[in-house]
Image (cartoon, rainbow, N blue to C red):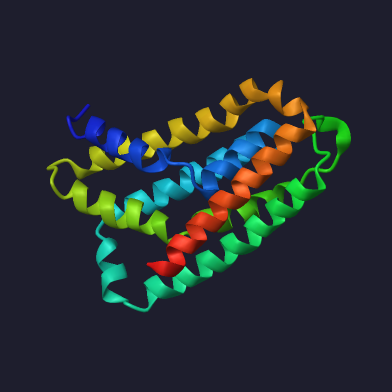
Amino acid sequence: MSPAFLPGFALGFSLILAIGAQNAFVLRQGLRREHVFAVCLACALSDAILIAAGVAGFGALAQALPWLEPVMRYGGAAFLLWYGALNLLSAWRGGETLQAEDGRGRGLWRTLGVVLALTWLNPHVYLDTVVLLGSVSAQYDDRLWFALGAICASFVFFFTLGYGARLLAPLFARPRAWQVLDLLIALVMWAIAARLLVM
């Protein structure tokens, strides 16, 4: 293994560790035990594509197309405002528990659509994975191993978050806990949207 692997892993892990819209969604799906594998895989593969693009030099594309950043920023903010409103409505209604047999979950394709939108419509993901990781990888002779380290970090993080969420299942057997989680998710979504709008 190349010495570039561990710095790639450490930087990749630190960039996705912060609680954001995508991580909140993965946590929610893990708590509900709905489509956990598909959601974690979609997030990790999306990161892998973006990391590979950054290391391959596509960060220069974002700089060459100045209109791309504001389009992604405002589109992402609009989506986050809408999704936050849905979570706030869910918190207001309450009554949700972890009982998997209630049959109120989303279908697989709708769930994947939401998580992919949360991933690909977030301009910060491009700054973190494409621009930042891409530029840091240029410091290493073995950029491929650096990229593999960052990609492994993404897989480890998302699958740990998705499947580790079940440890919180006893807490989320109570409807009040779901209301608090939905409210926190709404606030996270709106905070990220606000940051995007004032950039």
x then y, percent, for residue 180: 67, 39
x then y, percent, for residue 152: 38, 34
Residue 121 visible in the current orientation: no
Q: Nearer the viewer, residue 187 or 49?
A: 187
Q: Nearer the viewer, residue 136 or 185?
A: 185
* Location of residue 3 by image quarter: top left
* Location of residue 153 by image quarter: top left
Q: Which residue appears farthest toward the right when viewing the image?
A: 102
Quadrant of the rendering where the N terminus is positioned: top left
x then y, percent, for residue 98: 77, 30
Residue 99 visible in the current orientation: yes
Q: Residue at x 67, y 44 (%)?
A: 182
Q: Residue at x 37, y 67 (%)?
A: 199
Image-based side of 155 in relation to 116, left or right: left
x then y, percent, for residue 106: 76, 47
- Is 142 placed above or below 68 here? above
- Is 82 placed above or below 67 here? above
Q: Residue at x 58, y 40 (%)?
A: 26
- Is 48 placed above or below 199 here? above
Image-based side of 191 in relation to 14, left or right: right
Image-based side of 164 in relation to 88, left or right: left
Q: Residue at x 34, y 57 (%)?
A: 127
